[in-house]
Amino acid sequence: MKTRTVETRKGCRCRVLEGGSGMPVVFLHGAGGLLADNPFLDRLASRYHVFAPELPGYGESTGEELLEDMLDFTLHGWDVVAALGLRRPHLVGHSMGGMIAAEMAAVAPGDLDRLVLVAAAGLWIEAHPIPDIFALLPAQLVELLFQDPERGQQLLTGGVDFSDMEAFKNFYLGQQRRLAMAGKILFPIPNRRVSKRLYRVTAKTLVLWGAADRLIVPAYAQQWGRLVPGATVQTIPDAGHMLPYEQPETFVDALVRFLG
Amino acid sequence: MKFTWFNLMPWPYLPDDFREKNRSVWVDIPSTLYDPKKGHFVYHQYMDQLEYAESLGFDGIGCNEHHQNGYGLMPSPNLIAAGLARRTSRAAICVIGNSIAGYNPPIRVAEEFAMLDVISGGRLVAGFPVGTPMDTNFCYGQIPALTRDKYGEAHDLIMKAWAEDEPFAFDGKYNQLRWVNCWPKPIQKPHPPIYIPGGGSIETWDFCLDHDYNYSYLSFYGYLRGKSLLDGYWERVAQRGKDDSPYRAAFAQIICVADTDAQAEELYAEHCLYFFNRCLHVFPPFADPPGYRTVKTIKYGALSQLRMEAQRIMQGLTWKQLVDERFIIAGSPETVRQQLEECITGLRIGHLFCLLHTGNMPDWKTRHSTKLFAEKVMPQLRHLWSDWKHDDRWWIHPMDDRLHPEEGRPGAEKARQEWR
């Protein structure tokens, strides 16, 4: 994957990972951002033209002060698609990225081809309250995100040695900045009422979930399936919330089967 | 030098194993630990103590706002202040303050503060905190990264509501009101003195200086640790070309007075340790949601009050450590005077919030310490900042011929004699 920077008409500068050729697929990351290693993107790029933009406030992307609420985030998503010069791409959104992708598909249903919601945030079921990701110790977060927390810890930190104070401080500052941004649409309850707008979605939709997701439990997959017209729900065994990172091969296989 | 007697109003019945059995005194503390029938006596005792402080000659009496916690039982400080306004007639009533980012609409604060100013005859000191993250973000659901912006808008609305004589429309990002028309208005013009309590965000300095508000640094780690932050503030004051009146700044300090240093330990150690070990036992993530502190403040590296590093300091605290490191100022009147003088002149503060009730301190000890302070310490420190004694920009301006409703109640005669 190579990186480039695009500037939206609003003035956000976003870093985008790009690779492969063919049908355009835009991947929207979750609240933690893209991790250091994203093997599923490389795999996906062997078949499609893949774009993975980073939100303002993530990595080198700037302009976070320009985005404050759900509509800002949604239109920003389309602004990035426009800045990349794409027409009717497939949208794949993971976790918070799924929430944004679902909103994008609801406000501009004709502007995308297919929609994939991976462990998407954005709904709230009273019987299954989602843990408060803003009130977790680092170890607790890892437990919720990954089926195998030990391996998850390594994936999440990208091998940064936390006994090195400087490295820890940088990671901490980056994490504060990312989650400050995510909080604008996820805090205190990750529900900005997309459920009222999902009737508008006309794209063929796949809802993809890790069977062992402890953060947003699989009951939410069923709920998305009920709310998005004609959506297919697929659960993947031996994967938690970070399904694309935990099971990159199975994840990409499922995408390929759906996107063609 | 001005002295305000402040009561945090902690819940005094947290069990001995509270720290081991619960992760936090705030936000998700089991509400079964609260007993409303005991609470009845606790509220009255705490409010009596505030009234007692007035009778001993303190300049102000103070309370503040916190939610869902055993650290401070004042979700609505305005209710406490309303009670005090009826039972006192001389001291400033310092509400430090209302966490205005959480009020919807914040015009409610303009109205209630105006009511308090009117009922008290112009004795309100109005505090506008951003609020702790536990209160404003986790209990009251405000988005951390937008809290300061919303706070700023609430402030603008309240100040305009007090200043304008005609109804106006307010088209804010967070508040849209077609008809703003504050009734009643405060007695103090153009507005009551405004205090901005800060916990360590450096953005607060400029906000205070933009508007010439008092900056109140509320910390429980004493003046040695508070110094770097206050030094930063005064440096900013100089950079901005403002005068360095000590009344621009206030500091909160836990104080325990006894006849001797040894007696102070005997009388107060368990209650101070109760406060540090139980009342400040906050689950660290509740104290530091991403976006609450700006990257600039994080980089400044101020010791943030209840976060990881602070929780580490509190592991296994002893009385000796509390006293030696000046988390608290405790001892004989002379010891307390010496250390307080160092604190006041070192930090350059004109207002001291005296925390003379601490943790689960019983009423008699609180009154004992308070009385010794009022009689043997306060008079020795009054002379400080005499060069600035006419500077009343950050103090109340009550009306002259106000009512003294407390004088009609039984037993008032004695209290009045005590302070006259």
Image (cartoon, grey):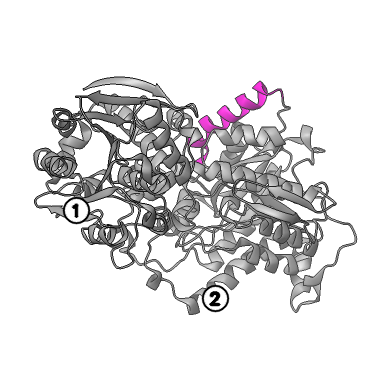
Q: Main secondary structure of the magenta part?
A: helix
Q: Is residue B239 magenta?
A: yes
Q: Residue furthest right?
A: B401
Residue at mark 2 to residue at mark 1: CA–CA distance: 48 Å
Q: Is residue A63 above or below residue A204?
A: above
The lab-note entry on whether marks 2 and 1 share a chain reads: no
Look at 34% across and 44% down and name the residue there: A101
Which disc number belongs to residue A213?
Answer: 1
Subunit of label 1: A
x, y percentage for residue B59?
72, 52
Label for residue B180?
none
In the picture of the structure, the residue carrying the numbered disc 2 is B41
Q: Is residue A167 left or right of residue B60?
A: left
Q: Is there a contact, CB below 8 Å, between mark 2 and mark 1?
A: no
| A33 drawn magenta | no
User: Numbered disc 2: what chain?
Assistant: B
Three-letter amino acid code at the position of disc 2: Phe
- For mark 1, does the 10 Å Cα neighbourhood hold few (<14), some (14 to 19), or many (20 or more) residues? many
Q: Nearer the viewer, residue A177 or B37?
A: A177
Image quarter of the N terminus of chain B? top right
Other-residue count near label 2 (Cα within 10 Å), few / some / many at <14 / 14–19 / ≥20: few
Q: What span is colored magenta in the figure?
A: B221-241
